[in-house]
Image (cartoon, rainbow, N blue to C red):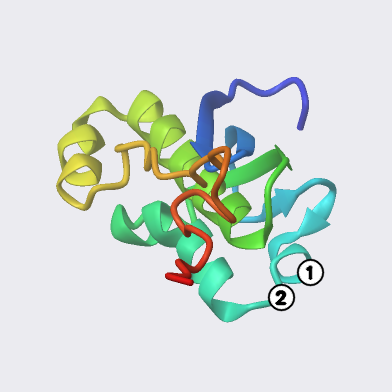
Amino acid sequence: MAEARYYYGTGRRKTSVARVRLYPGTGDIIINGKPMAEYFTRDRDRLTASEPLQTTDMASKFSVMIKVEGGGVSGQADAVRHGISRALAEADPNLHSLLRQHGLLTRDARAKERKKPGLKRARKAPQYTKR
């Protein structure tokens, strides 16, 4: 399988990065050496990760090998989704507009805001006391 031509896409979300390779195949999705059902135990994460393949009806045409690191489970699922979308757009340029319409090619830039000095969190201030 390593010798076959593949399409590549990098997905990012929060602090997670997913490196995705699409091979012509049967629809297997392997994440960090494990089947997707074993890696993502929640249905929501599995649905999120495979959304681009379902949207474009390409689930049975490609096998997917993914290396993902950083962040938490939901961030990783979103990074996988972004990476698969980019790889699909590279594999078939006609899918680009469909993926774009469903918002799958847009990088979600929301991330945790840094803590500011004098505050408890990014924006929460200590309680004000008058006396």
Callout 2: few (<14), some (14-19), or many (20+) C-alpha neighbours within 10 Å?
few
Callout 1: few (<14), some (14-19), or many (20+) C-alpha neighbours within 10 Å?
few
Q: Is residue 19 above or below residue 80?
A: above
Where disc 2 sits, the SS reads loop
Q: Is residue 50 above or below residue 25?
A: below
Count of numbered labels shown in the rendering: 2
Q: Nearer the viewer, residue 115 or 63?
A: 115
- For residue 38, which numbered disc appears in the image? 1
Q: Is residue 12 above or below residue 58?
A: above
Identity of the residue drawn at 44% across and 52% down: 123
Q: Nearer the viewer, residue 40 or 120?
A: 120
The amino acid type, in three-letter code, at marker 1 is: Glu
Foreground: disc 1 or disc 2 = 2
**What residue sits right under mark 2 in the picture?**
41
The amino acid type, in three-letter code, at marker 2 is: Thr
Q: Are marks 1 and 2 in contact (CB under 8 Å)?
A: yes
Q: Where is residue 4 shown, x and y percent of the image?
A: 67, 23
Q: Quadrant of the N terminus?
A: top right
State left or right for residue 98 relative to residue 16. left
Identity of the residue drawn at 62% across and 35% down: 17
